[in-house]
Amino acid sequence: MRSPGAEGGPSQACFLVPELAATSVGGRLDVEGDEGRHAVSVRRVRLGETVSLTDGRGSLAEGRVVECRPPNRMRVEIDQIRFDPRVVPWIEVGLSVLKGDRMARAIEQLTEAGVEGITPVIADRSVARWQPGRESGEIGRLRRRAAEAAKQSRRAWLPEVRLPATLTDLTEDRASRLLVVLAEDGPAAGDAWWRDRLVDRIEPIAEVLVLVGPEGGFSPSEVRALRTAGAHPLALGPGVMRSGTAALAGVVAVSMMSGRWQTGDRD
């Protein structure tokens, strides 16, 4: 997998354009509104500069800037466009709500790592609590951070940041979904059990849900409920990680074991 700017040059700007799927190579597309303002007035793109465009639903294009009109309009001539299919297995994360800006930072990192969805979890031992009536505002802020991270990493798919949920909400539908809960007492990544399911694929897996508890871990009643739901524990090593770090490490482990990252650019 190639990182933006991996070849030594500066990373080109990427902008979110919902109409991208309707355009074609050689066509011209106007970037307006908030994205246009960000391009013209914040990033200060210049005529002739190459930029990336994505609709967040699989389409990704590159093109040359042919017009900049302050304060919020940029016109791009499309040089190339492609559609990236969803990667299998689909990885989602249920992450216990974190304090302060740590939740937003975790969502940025998970977005860069390629997850398809993130759900804030209200756990028994969660220290952070969103005030009643402020959930929609918090989710809106987190969605904006995810969108910025997706553009920074030039992702073709924008991850969905969902409304807060309980563990019961997340574990009710288990069809074709592997439930993974990060736990100190589980088999480590790379153990035979995990190789069988994620590497050799002894059973079809369309989606993996990685569940991450708060700093104090899931409560005994939550652990029992997860076992009943068929969740499988995964250990990430002898040390203890903070929840945001553990979430990222868990996604990396699942991505490596499942071969998700082998389908991209290998050079």
Image: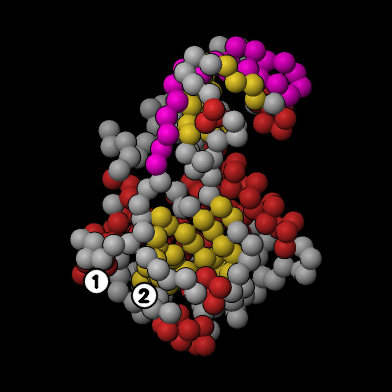
Report helix, strand or loop for mark 2. strand
How packed is label 1: few (under 14 Cα within 10 Å), some, or many (20 or more)?
few
Question: Horizontal and vertical percent for residue 61?
Answer: 48, 27
Give the residue pinned by disc 1: 193
- Counting residues from the start of the chain, the first of labels 2 and 1 encountered is 1
Picture residue at 56% right of the left edge, 73% below the top: 169
Picture residue at 42% right of the left edge, 29% below the top: 82
Label 1 amino acid?
A: Trp
Picture residue at 67% right of the left edge, 70% below the top: 128
Question: Horizontal and vertical percent for residue 40?
Answer: 69, 22
Compared to 79, does 35 lie above or below?
below
186 lies left or right of 42: left
Picture residue at 40% right of the left edge, 32% below the top: 6
128 lies left or right of 151: right
How far apart in space, not on screen, are marks 2 and 1 (Cα)? 10 Å
Contact between labelled residues 1 and 2, with CB atoms less than 8 Å apart: yes
Give the residue pinned by disc 2: 232
Question: Horizontal and vertical percent for residue 129?
Answer: 70, 71
Compared to 263, does 88 lie above or below?
below
133 lies left or right of 209: right
Viewer-side residue, 242 vs 110: 110
Is residue 74 magenta-colored? yes
**Based on the displayed image, in which of its 4 quarters is residue 197 positioned?**
bottom left
Helix, strand or loop for the magenta stretch, by majority: strand
Label 2 amino acid?
A: His
**Range drawn in magenta:** 65-85
